[in-house]
Amino acid sequence: MTVRTCLPWPDKRLRTRAADVAEITDEVRKIWADMIDTMEAMPGVGLAAPQIGVMLRLAVVDGSTERGRAVRLANPEILHSSVELREHEEASPNLPGVSAKVKRPRAVTVRFLNELGQIDRRDFVGIEATSVQHQIDHLNGRMYFDRLSKVKRDMLLRKARKQG
């Protein structure tokens, strides 16, 4: 497949809610394959379609150490979040060179359309829970730094501009 280019911040598509996926087609499967190749090339633990300019609610997540275990999600929706939070250093290929600690629920239950076009539900814990929440934010036009205080967000964006 193909490693795709990630959109540079502040491309307006990164602030736009992605469209629902009506059905799983060969085209959707090809986009997922390209997304996995792109995620592996970074390397990262997840990628959302809007990050590569595809405005569909598609995401991939792979927090395994051996890789090759990517979960393909269409129209992911969080059904339940743990009360317990987990802090993790998050970053994005759309704004390279900067990262920030973000607190999110340690575990989430997500409903999504899988690669067979069936409604699936899965529990994600730890790094994969962080990643799937991060990808859903992207699908909703949000970036991880939107979860920071205004002061921290402004500092992060200033640092990114200096590096750019």
Image (cartoon, helix red, strand yellow):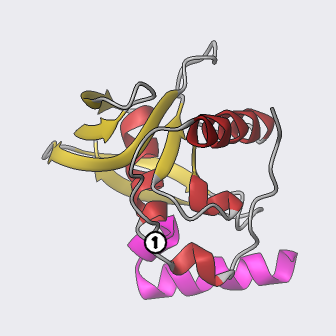
Residue 119 picture quarter: top left
What residue is shown at x 42% (from left), y 53% (from top)? 21
What residue is shown at x 80% (from left), y 50% (from top)? 4
Residue 10 to residue 122: above or below: below
**SS at circle 1:** loop
Q: Nearer the viewer, residue 34 or 93?
A: 34
Residue 145 to residue 49: above or below: below
Residue picked out by circle 1: 142
Q: How many marks?
A: 1
What residue is shown at x 85% (from left), y 75% (from top)? 163
Residue 107 in view here: no
The quadrant in which the C terminus is found is bottom right
Residue 150 drawn in magenta: yes
Magenta stretch?
141-164
What residue is shown at x 54% (from left), y 25% (from top)? 70
Q: Amino acid at mark 1?
A: Arg
Residue 37 picture quarter: top right
Q: Residue furthest top?
A: 66
* Whole-percent x, y for residue 144 in the image: 49, 65
The quadrant in which the N terminus is found is top right
